[in-house]
Every structure is written in C-alpha cells, then in structure tokens.
Amino acid sequence: MLSYWEKSTLIHHDLIVIGSGIVGLSAALHYQLAHPKKKVAVIERGLFPSGASTKNAGFVCFGSISELAENARTDSQDELLSLVEKRYKGGLELRQLLGDSRINYRPVGGYELDFDGDLHERVEAYNDWLKPLFNEPVFCDARDKIPSFGFSQAKIKGLVKNQFEGSIDTGKMMDAFARKAREAGVQFYTQTEVLHYQEQTHGVEVTVATTDGPLRLFTYQLALCTNAFTKALLPEADLEPGRGLVLITKPLTWAPPQGTFHYHSGYNYFRNAGNRILLGGARHLDLKGETTTKEGINTLLKEQLTEDLKSFIAPSRPLEIDYAWSGIMAFGKEKAPLLLHPSIHVHAAVRLGGMGVALGTGLGKELAQRLGATTS
Ligand SMILES: Cc1cc2nc3c(=O)[nH]c(=O)nc-3n(C[C@H](O)[C@H](O)[C@H](O)COP(=O)(O)OP(=O)(O)OC[C@H]3O[C@@H](n4cnc5c(N)ncnc54)[C@H](O)[C@@H]3O)c2cc1C
C-alpha cells in the first residue's frame, strides 16, 4: 500500500537503468552528470551486481594474437580494427574516469603462451595491422621471460607480449564506479528484480518484485543494461549467455608471475591477485553446458584448469586451489556489443562478450548520450 508521499515523489523517475554492472553504472553516471536535475535510478536484482562485472578476471585487454585471429573468422578486418579501438580506448576511458590508484590499475603487460613455438612469426604482421591505432609496435617476442616466469619450458615454447595490457582490481573498480554514481545523485535499489515493463504514451511502467509483492514504478526513459539476462525482458535480443569459471589459489609462499596471461585463443587466462594466482576460462571445453544463465561450477573445466596450473603454469611449485566462482557473460555471432532502441522510451546496451571491462564504460557513455538526445 503506497502513501501519498511515495506516490507523489518516490515512484516517478526520468531514467531507470536496469542492471548495476559496468554498463548500467556508466550509463547512469554519464546521464546524471549531463543532466544533474533529472531523477535517475539503477535497479539491481542482486545485493551486488549479479552477472559478470564483479566476477571477472580484471584484465584490461583488447585481444591476444590468436584470439584476434579467431575473431577474424566471423568479423571483417575493418570491424575487428574498430572493435580493438573501442576496447583499447574503453580501457583508457575507464582508467581516466575512476583513476588508476582507485582501481589498482597495473600496467603489467599481457602475454600469450604458445605451445607450438611459432607465434612470434605473426608479431610483425599484427603490429603492421595495428599501427594506425597505436603508432608503435603492440606485440613483441618475449620467449626470454619463460624461465623467470617459472613456466614449464618443455610445454611452453613461445611467449608474445602485448605492452598495452594491464590489470585492475575488479572489486575496487565496481566500488569506485558505484560511489561516483551515488555522488552524482544516482539512486540505487538493490535486491530488486524487474519483472517486466510496459511502454506507455508518456513513458514506461516498470514492475519490480518487492517483499510486499509487485510494485509499479514509472519512468520517462528505460535503459536495459542486463547483458546475458536481457532475453527475459526483451526476447528478441540477439544474444546467448555464456558462463565463465574462475579459480583462485590459496596465498602462495613464492612470488607468482606478474602480468596478464592468455592461452588457447583467449579462452584461458591467469594473473596474480596479490600473492595468489587467479585463473579461469576453458569454456570451449563444454560450450553447450556453459550456455546458461545459471551460476555453477563445471567440474570438467575446474579439473582442466587445475591440471594446467600444475603442469605448465607453475610446475613443481607448492600450491592449492582455495575456491572457485562463476559469472555470466553474453555473446553473439559478431563480437560488437548491441545498442538497441526497441520502443520509443526504451533503449538497451548489452552483449559485451568477454571484454566488457574494456568496452563497458564507453558503451554506457554512448547509451547515456542516446538517452540524452531524446530527454523530455
Ligand atoms: C569469469 C569472467 C571473467 C571475465 N574476465 C574479463 C576480463 O578479464 N576483462 C574483460 O574485459 N572482461 C571480462 N569479463 C567480461 C566482463 O566482465 C563483462 O563483459 C562485463 O562485466 C559486462 O558488463 P554488463 O554491465 O554488460 O553486464 P553485467 O555485469 O552482467 O550486469 C548486468 C546486471 O543486470 C542485472 N539484472 C539482469 N536482469 C535483471 C532484472 N530483471 N532486474 C534487475 N537486475 C537485473 C544483473 O543482476 C547484473 O548485475 C569476464 C566475465 C566473466 C564472467
């Protein structure tokens, strides 16, 4: 039962953003900064964001050589170059917006592990292709670092470095983002699921689940930043969910390698997180099983990642897996994210793939600009 005060002031908004992941926070923040007098709310079904943004590995990256080669099977060279530009500039934008020290950005460089020993032969061609964007070589042969990183020299035959990659602390990044949005005036409703919405003549009616039953809110504009979960609200969205697994070791008694590391065309990755190793991926081993919006630990993937850790990442080093978690991403046939405008007052920015840390801030900003262009 709503009071007069609730009805007159609290249920009406200028903009409601569904989803408090990177894209939702960036959209809400940028819109609020551009329109300080507007009433902006972010609605999130979890206590924390419950998709990918607080579950990821914290790589600020734009693609290893073999991952870009794999992407080139579905995307043209021009599309791919434009995507690399968006990923790279998106990473810079995130760092500029929140500040390197607040998100613990570390310019450690990214490395691709090579099992065949011929990856370095492709360095020059990729540097030439990326020259218009970076104006200097992106990749270099780093085979000399294999012994000091402690990798198995019998299994790892090559290593290529990307000097423009780095890592962040994902938790600190999301905390800094939410604080900045709150400071700008954005209202947050967490543990509140949006059940459905209905476009109306002068805005959108948004029905949320509350402990007292469904409640209707009203907004002039609605932004869906629901990534993998979008189909529940917008069935025509062209995307599939993809679960990602992450394992973390117990604190190590030895110094883990410093950097962001990839192998198997970007499907697998690891880095240090303080004095632990965080590693994840291997989704390609069970793509069907991992096409789900449900959190969970796939034992096959967990066993393979643990085996990788012991056999070539840190062979004959004492280590133990502490725990694992999963997060849910969204993928499409093409790698570019989707910016949709399904009805007059409704927009969506979704399908971030596995590089939303890099892409999310820019995409949210672009969405805020679109919303601003049609503001009442
Ligand atoms: C294991 C893993 C590792 C990754 N590693 C990296 C990496 O190292 N680098 C990188 O660039 N990217 C990485 N990613 C990808 C990156 O995290 C995502 O692309 C990015 O976080 C997507 O952000 P988003 O805001 O679009 O979606 P999300 O973070 O998923 O946010 C969507 C939000 O919408 C909420 N929501 C959905 N439906 C509703 C509803 N009906 N009502 C209310 N709320 C709702 C969800 O709870 C969720 O919080 C990784 C992802 C995973 C899972």
Image (spheres, rainbow, N blue to C red):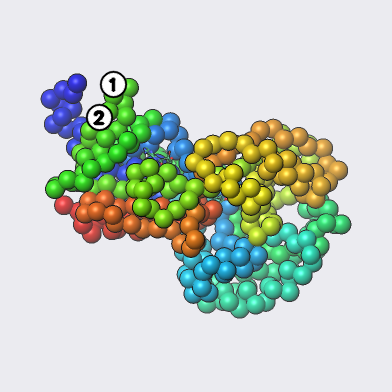
Q: Say whether residue 93 is visible.
A: no
Residue 215 - label = 2
Residue furthest to the front = 288
Q: Residue at x 73, y 40 (%)?
A: 303
Q: Left or right: where does residue 8 sit relative to residue 226?
A: left
Give x and y (percent) for residue 133: 52, 73
Instruction: Tell me the quarter of the picture where residue 118 sits.
Output: bottom right
Q: Nearer the viewer, residue 361 or 196?
A: 196
**Crowd class of label 2 (few under 14; some 14 to 19; many from 20; radius 10 Å):** some
Q: Nearer the viewer, residue 285 or 1?
A: 285
Q: Residue at x 60, y 55 (%)?
A: 166
Q: Residue at x 25, y 29 (%)?
A: 215
* Cβ atoms at labels 1 and 2 below 8 Å apart: yes
Give x and y (percent) for residue 359: 47, 57
Residue 212 - label = 1
Secondary structure beneath disc 1?
loop
Residue 202 - label = none
Residue at disc 1, CB closer than 8 Å to ligand 1? no
User: In what quadrant of the picture does the N terminus appear?
Assistant: top left
Q: Left or right: where does residue 299 sit relative to residue 52?
A: right
Give x and y (percent) for residue 45: 39, 34
State the count of labels: 2
Q: Amino acid at mark 1?
A: Asp
Q: CA distance from mark 1 to mark 2?
A: 8 Å
Q: Amino acid at mark 2?
A: Leu
Q: Residue at x 14, y 48 (%)?
A: 201
Secondary structure beneath disc 2?
strand
Give x and y (percent) for residue 146: 80, 58
